[in-house]
Image (cartoon, rainbow, N blue to C red):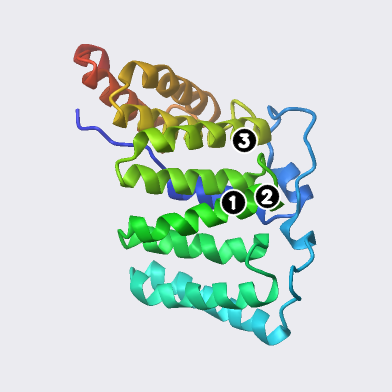
């Protein structure tokens, strides 16, 4: 059986960023019933005053245009052209909100993802790290936006073959997902799958197996046996068992 990896980094990072930029009430509504009853209040990035000044209406409009252009170019696969849009958006945000403001981190994260998509992992890494540092300091260590940054940086490190460096980041991201949406949420299953994939990449198949089984169990119970993510988990588990020399167990 050919192995299909389930490292849905882009999807979970985008999801976490969406939560991070929502008002705390929206995050609460997004949580499932299995989330912990007591939730610490999330910091709303839009409630944090500018470090320098609020941007002008013209700057706000320009950033919207740049974001639309950058996203549109990336949808067409023209990441090189989109890069300049994100760099200009960063410059505007830094001049107004400040270089360490959570809203500036939005454009920083977009540039990091852009460079990653171009295969320029070394160039992307400092932007991932800067985004993470801002969100940890200004939003909190357990904020969904911080979890998104942890996943993004881990993706970048893994793409450079630095799997052991990525592992603790993925463990932190998983802890955030468990605390924010619950241990049996499908998005938590994605974080579990990401960590399992990292352990597989390190050749630690025995450590990865229980995580893969946990992700599969969540997806089967919450999404159903016929869901594409459930099929993905089945493939990932089968690949893991094959790597352990247990091919007969991997058969359907």
Is disc 1 in contact with disc 3, using a CB cutoff of under 8 Å?
A: no
Instruction: Please state which of residues 216 and 55 is positioned toward the viewer in this rendering.
Output: 55
Question: Could you tell me which secondary element the residue under label 3 belongs to?
Answer: helix
Q: Is residue 216 above or below residue 133?
A: above
**Residue underneath mark 3:** 176
State which tag comes first along the sequence, 1 or 3: 1
From this viewpoint, which residue is outermost toward the bottom? 58
Q: Residues within 10 Å of mark 1 (few under 14, many from 20)?
A: many
**Residue 236 pos. (x, y %):** 33, 29
For the point 46% across and 26% down, the residue is: 215
Question: Could you tell me which secondary element the residue under label 1 belongs to?
Answer: helix
For the N terminus, the image quarter is top left
Is disc 1 in contact with disc 2, using a CB cutoff of under 8 Å?
A: yes
Q: Residues within 10 Å of mark 3 (few under 14, many from 20)?
A: many
Q: CA distance from mark 1 to mark 2?
A: 6 Å
Where residue 210 sits, quadrant-wise, is top left
Instruction: Please state which of residues 179 and 215 is positioned toward the viewer in this rendering.
Output: 179
Instruction: Please state which of residues 66 and 228 is positioned toward the viewer in this rendering.
Output: 66
In the picture, measured across the screen, residue 128 lies left or right of residue 243, that is right
**Residue underneath mark 1:** 133
Where residue 211 sits, quadrant-wise, is top left
**Residue underneath mark 2:** 137
For the C terminus, the image quarter is top left
**Residue 238 pos. (x, y %):** 28, 23
Residue 200, can we see it? Answer: yes
For the point 32% across and 27% down, the residue is: 200
Mark in front: 2 vs 3: 2
The disc placed on residue 28 is none
Q: Residues within 10 Å of mark 2 (few under 14, many from 20)?
A: few
For the point 49% across and 44% down, the residue is: 151
């Amino acid at each position: 059986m050919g192995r299909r990896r389930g490292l849905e980094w882009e999807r979970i990072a985008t999801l976490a960023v969406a939560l991070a930029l929502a008002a705390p009430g929206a995050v609460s509504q997004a949580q499932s019933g299995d989330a912990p009853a007591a939730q610490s209040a999330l910091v709303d990035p839009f409630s944090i005053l500018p470090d320098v000044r609020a941007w002008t209406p013209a700057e706000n409009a320009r950033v919207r245009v740049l974001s639309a252009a950058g996203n549109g170019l990336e949808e067409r696969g023209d990441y090189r052209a989109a890069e300049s849009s994100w760099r200009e958006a960063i410059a505007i945000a830094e001049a107004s909100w400040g270089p360490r403001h959570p809203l500036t981190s939005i454009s920083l994260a977009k540039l990091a993802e852009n460079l990653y998509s171009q295969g320029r992992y070394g160039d992307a890494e400092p932007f991932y790290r800067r985004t993470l540092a801002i969100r940890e300091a200004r939003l909190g260590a357990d904020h969904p936006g911080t979890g998104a940054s942890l996943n993004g940086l881990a993706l970048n490190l893994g793409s450079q073959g630095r799997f052991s460096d990525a592992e603790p980041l993925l463990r932190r991201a998983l802890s955030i997902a468990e605390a924010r949406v619950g241990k049996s949420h499908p998005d938590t299953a994605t974080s579990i799958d990401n960590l399992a994939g990292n352990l597989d990449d390190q050749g630690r198949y025995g450590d990865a197996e229980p995580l893969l089984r946990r992700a599969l169990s969540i997806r089967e119970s919450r999404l159903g046996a016929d869901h594409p993510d459930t099929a993905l988990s089945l493939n990932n588990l089968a690949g893991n068992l094959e790597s352990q020399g247990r091919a007969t167990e991997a058969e359907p």
